[in-house]
Image (cartoon, rainbow, N blue to C red):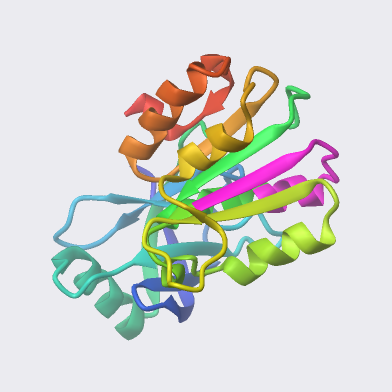
């Protein structure tokens, strides 16, 4: 397994349980990837763990990761300790087939659950860079409003880019929430009764991806137009 050493440039807390990690390449080779792919973190005494790359490829080869951490998780506890006490970390990759492509010409639904927003973010950034004219509708599902840890960015895309729409969906919304509630894929089926014309990029819990595929196909969706690494697991 080929590995790449990356400098730990920044660790920022985005939400109560979400950390943004920015990594810069060292003097060695850089990891070359496509938007939507993931890498594996090579942590001493732990098996490699996959993390989606949360940014489209950049000229300076910076890599952004979104790390979800709960205090009772020994792996992410060790990972955050390393990220805040060491200078470098090792990665392998890239992996995954759920990557941005300018074909086919179908309009796009982007389905993100929790930190599944990370690869979807990279795909949207790549589409923006390519001036992709296809209609894109991002649905981001989360348990609580705090879990929509980059809601401002997603809202900015929708406000400033004509062909991008954004719908946040909460399972446990606050009392003053006026948006969509419940399961994120059901928000899609409620809005789009005929899914035959669409392609879908989906990232998040496996259960979400397979439930979406099952329900979308009932509304005309063509399975081969689903891009999701969960299908290869």
Tell me which residue sits at (41%, 45%) in the image.
183
Q: Nearer the viewer, residue 110 or 55?
A: 110
The image quarter in which residue 226 lies:
top right
Q: Is residue 30 above or below residue 109?
A: below
Across and down, in percent, residue 2 comes to: 38, 45
Q: How many marks?
A: 0
Q: Quadrant of the N terminus?
A: top left
Tell me which residue sits at (66%, 53%) in the image.
166
Tell me which residue sits at (79%, 63%) in the image.
159
Tell me which residue sits at (80%, 36%) in the image.
134
Observer able to see residue 60: no
Q: Nearer the viewer, residue 188 or 224?
A: 188
Q: Quadrant of the C terminus?
A: top left
Is residue 189 found left or right of 126 in the rendered image?
A: left
Q: Is residue 59 above or below residue 87?
A: above
As drawn, the residue found furthest toward the bottom would be 85
Is residue 194 found left or right of 115 in the rendered image?
A: right
Q: Is residue 17 above or below residue 139?
A: below
Observer able to see residue 218: yes
Q: Is residue 51 above or below residue 199?
A: below
Across and down, in percent, residue 185 comes to: 47, 38
Q: Nearer the viewer, residue 123 or 44?
A: 123
Q: Nearer the viewer, residue 38 or 9?
A: 38
Q: Is residue 156 magenta?
A: no
Across and down, in percent, residue 9 comes to: 51, 78
The image quarter in which residue 103 lies:
top right
Q: Is residue 135 magenta?
A: yes
Magenta residues (range): 124-140
């Amino acid at each position: 397994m080929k590995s790449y050493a990356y400098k730990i440039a920044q660790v920022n807390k985005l939400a109560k349980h979400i950390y943004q990690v920015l990594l810069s390449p060292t003097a060695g080779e850089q990891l070359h990837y496509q938007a939507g792919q993931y890498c594996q973190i090579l942590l001493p005494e732990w098996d490699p763990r996959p993390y989606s790359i949360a940014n489209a490829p950049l000229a300076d080869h910076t890599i952004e990761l979104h790390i979800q951490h709960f205090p009772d998780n020994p792996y992410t506890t060790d990972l955050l300790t390393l990220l805040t006490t060491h200078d470098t970390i090792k990665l392998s990759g890239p992996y995954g087939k759920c990557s941005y492509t300018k074909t086919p010409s179908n309009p796009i639904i982007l389905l993100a659950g929790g930190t599944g927003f990370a690869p979807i973010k990279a795909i949207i950034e790549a589409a923006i860079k390519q001036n992709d004219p296809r209609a894109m509708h991002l649905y981001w599902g989360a348990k609580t409003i705090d879990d929509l840890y980059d809601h401002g960015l997603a809202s900015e895309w929708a406000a400033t880019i004509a062909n991008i729409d954004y719908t946040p969906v909460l399972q446990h919304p606050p009392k003053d929430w006026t948006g969509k509630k419940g399961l994120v894929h059901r928000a899609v089926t409620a809005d789009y009764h005929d899914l035959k014309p669409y392609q879908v990029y989906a990232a998040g819990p496996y259960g979400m991806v397979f439930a979406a595929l099952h329900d979308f196909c009932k509304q005309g969706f063509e399975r081969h137009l689903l891009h999701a690494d969960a299908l290869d697991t």
